[in-house]
């Protein structure tokens, strides 16, 4: 095992890989390739090559530290194998005990894009002030300026939201049934019921 | 056949229909949570199983399910500024209602997907916060124009345009308030029009008033008639010796 | 290289070492041996053996991630080799401006005098806990005693705030024409408007 490692370490890409390891182990948020390249003072393509090496070295089953691509960048996390041990030591303050109301509100903010509390309330049908405040406190949504017309604060999901839900980006959210199809389905069911009614 | 004893097995509720209505009346169950289509399917199946058409049961069912649907629609779309369904023809109103309900269902699907995702990622732990031995980053801020501060405060002092505040008033007035009002009305008069009695009230208040009305019907203090869909709802004081022949329904509903 | 790795991974101490890697990469503070043993549900001596393996694997010159023993226990840090890259990562570019939430909060504290978070929240119409914490971290506002009635901490602007905004003192703040005669009147007006605003 020592021999091939020494051979590789004379390779500058391996040195770059070590630099990236160092950056990722101290970073607080996932780092995009461009940011890694800037900090490492190296070319983006070479950073990508090094990340390929690291993805293999830090993969599930081989290492307790796992490299993942999430929230628009790269980050280290614990291996799934160690989840029980992590569960004994760490709380999950961000995602623990998210209510149905909180999940619906998160879905509204994620799908509607930056939106105000009245806008979310309109879709959910109930007031959402407390729910939104809770999500802000958890760090899953954040303020994103004010709505120009009404002056209400707009909210957006945060990179932490993407990280907690394991999304590379918001574009990974599944497309939900389009409205037209759903309305058609309801209409169809009503017609089926009507057809059973004797004239 | 008793409509109220219709057993339901929905995502949000399991039990007889009348318990579901009671929970909605007591605001212990959000109307938005109820899958009305599933209730209709359950009723139709029950009807088919019996093999005969019970018109009284159908009438009662339609009134109850329509009120539930209306309440759900109002709970989901409380904004007074929104398109008034009452101004639309039945065809358009149905379409609008279906569209809005579909929008809410889409949101529920999104929430469900997020919940599943969370479950699937429950064994991924990562650090939230700075690395213990990392250098502390220093944030530096460029020179700022103090005019921005005055500007921010002036913007906060600007009166917002007159927009609907109904979302802030989404607290249900107590059903009892309307029960008392209707009972008082019925003591003075033998008949009144529901619409006239709720004139000038918000949609939410109207919906609660409607629930109070249903409660009066269920407690056999009043009967309700409506000549046609969207027509005026007449509320009549119940006869002292009402026809209580053991059937669950002591009132008729011709809105079907 | 693959062969010896497979041999090692069949060794339970290596599995324990992977668990410890995982715990250390999630931790925000150094972890003492006892805490690691408890989380890994293993004996202290075996944890020490595993830490020995890791100290060799994550050492200067061999890895960008370095295992360090400090006063409070064990933690990962970036290798010295990568110090320059880490410096570039943490050296934030000078920020051009503040968020709307930060500006509104600063304006409230600057114009209305020392105030508590609930007071600022009433003026803005939305919660400000995270915003105030961010401004404290940046050194733009600081604690200024407690409000005796409510028991809440009051905040004031700092000398750094005055430097950043180019003010000799708070008396140089631009005039707020006809918003009110004094801070109390302005505050009352802002609270009234916030209460009307759609969330």
Image: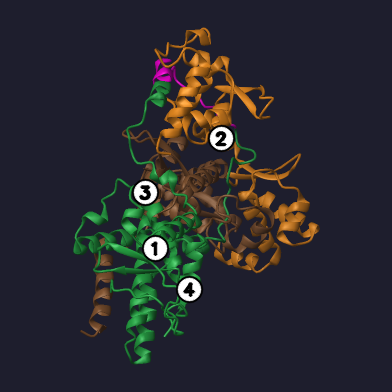
Chain colours: A brown, B green, C orange
Task: Please name the residue that numbered disc 4 is placed on.
Answer: B18
On-image quarter of the C terminus of chain A: bottom left
Q: Secondary structure at mark 1?
A: helix
Q: Earlier in the sequence, mark 3 or mark 4?
A: 4
On what subunit does the disc labeled 1 rest? Answer: B
Task: Please name the residue that numbered disc 1 is placed on.
Answer: B109
Q: Is residue C136 magenta?
A: no
Q: Is residue A169 visible?
A: no
**Dot label at residue C129:** 2
Task: Please name the residue that numbered disc 3 is placed on.
Answer: B201
Residue A197 lies, with reference to residue C120, above or below; the image says below
Q: Nearer the viewer, residue C89 or A30?
A: A30
On-image quarter of the N terminus of chain A: bottom right
Q: Nearer the viewer, residue B19 or A167?
A: B19
Task: Place residue B60 in its image quadrant.
Answer: bottom left
The stretch of residues the image draws in magenta is B136-151
Expressed as whole percent of the image width and height from the top left, the position of residue A82 reads: 62, 61
Residue C63 lies, with reference to residue B108, above or below; the image says above
Dot in front, 3 or 4: 3
Same chain check for tags 4 and 1: yes
The answer for how far apart the CA atoms under marks 1 and 2 are is: 32 Å
The answer for how far apart the CA atoms under marks 3 and 4 are is: 27 Å
The answer for how far apart the CA atoms under marks 3 and 2 are is: 38 Å
On what subunit does the disc labeled 3 rest? Answer: B
Q: Is residue B89 left or right of residue B216?
A: left
On what subunit does the disc labeled 2 rest? Answer: C
């Amino acid at each position: 095992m020592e021999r091939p490692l020494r051979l590789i370490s004379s390779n500058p890409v391996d040195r770059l890989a070590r630099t990236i390891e160092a950056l990722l182990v101290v970073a607080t948020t996932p780092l995009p390739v461009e940011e890694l390249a800037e900090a490492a003072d190296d070319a983006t393509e070479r950073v990508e090559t090094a990340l390929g090496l690291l993805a293999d070295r830090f993969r599930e089953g081989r290492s307790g530290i796992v490299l993942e691509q999430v929230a628009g960048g790269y980050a280290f996390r614990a291996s799934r194998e160690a989840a029980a041990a992590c569960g004994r030591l760490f709380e999950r303050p961000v995602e623990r005990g998210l209510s149905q109301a909180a999940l619906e509100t998160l879905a509204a903010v994620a799908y509607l894009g930056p939106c105000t509390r009245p806008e979310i309330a309109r879709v959910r049908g109930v007031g959402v002030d407390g729910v939104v405040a809770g999500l802000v406190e958890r760090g899953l949504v954040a303020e994103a300026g004010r709505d120009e017309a009404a002056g209400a604060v707009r909210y957006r999901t945060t990179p932490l939201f993407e990280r907690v839900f394991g999304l590379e980006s918001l574009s990974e959210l599944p497309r939900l049934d389009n409205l037209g199809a759903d309305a058609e389905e309801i209409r169809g069911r009503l017609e089926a019921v009507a057809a059973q009614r004797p004239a | 056949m008793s409509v109220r004893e219709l057993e339901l097995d929905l995502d949000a509720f399991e039990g007889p229909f009348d318990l579901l209505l009671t929970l909605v009346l007591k605001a212990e169950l959000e109307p938005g949570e109820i899958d009305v289509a599933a209730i209709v399917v359950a009723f139709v199946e029950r009807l088919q199983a019996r093999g005969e058409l019970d018109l009284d049961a159908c009438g009662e069912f339609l009134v109850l399910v329509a009120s539930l649907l209306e309440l759900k629609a109002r709970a989901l779309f409380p904004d007074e500024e929104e398109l008034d369904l009452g101004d639309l023809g039945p065809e358009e109103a149905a379409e609008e209602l279906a569209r809005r309900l579909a929008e809410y269902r889409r949101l529920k699907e999104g929430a469900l997907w997020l919940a599943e995702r969370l479950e699937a990622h429950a064994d991924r732990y990562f650090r939230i916060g700075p690395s213990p031995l990392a250098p502390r980053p220093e944030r530096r801020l460029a020179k700022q124009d103090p005019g921005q501060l005055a500007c921010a405060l002036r913007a906060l002092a600007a009166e917002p345009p007159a927009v609907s505040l109904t979302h802030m008033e989404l607290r249900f007035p107590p059903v009892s308030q309307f029960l008392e009002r209707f009972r008082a009305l019925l003591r003075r008069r033998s008949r009144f029009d529901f619409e006239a009695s709720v004139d000038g009230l918000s949609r939410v208040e109207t919906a609660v008033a409607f629930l109070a009305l249903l409660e009066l019907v269920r407690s056999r203090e009043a009967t309700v008639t409506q000549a046609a869909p969207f027509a005026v709802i007449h509320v009549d004081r119940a006869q002292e010796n009402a026809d209580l022949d053991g059937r669950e329904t002591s009132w008729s509903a011709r809105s079907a």
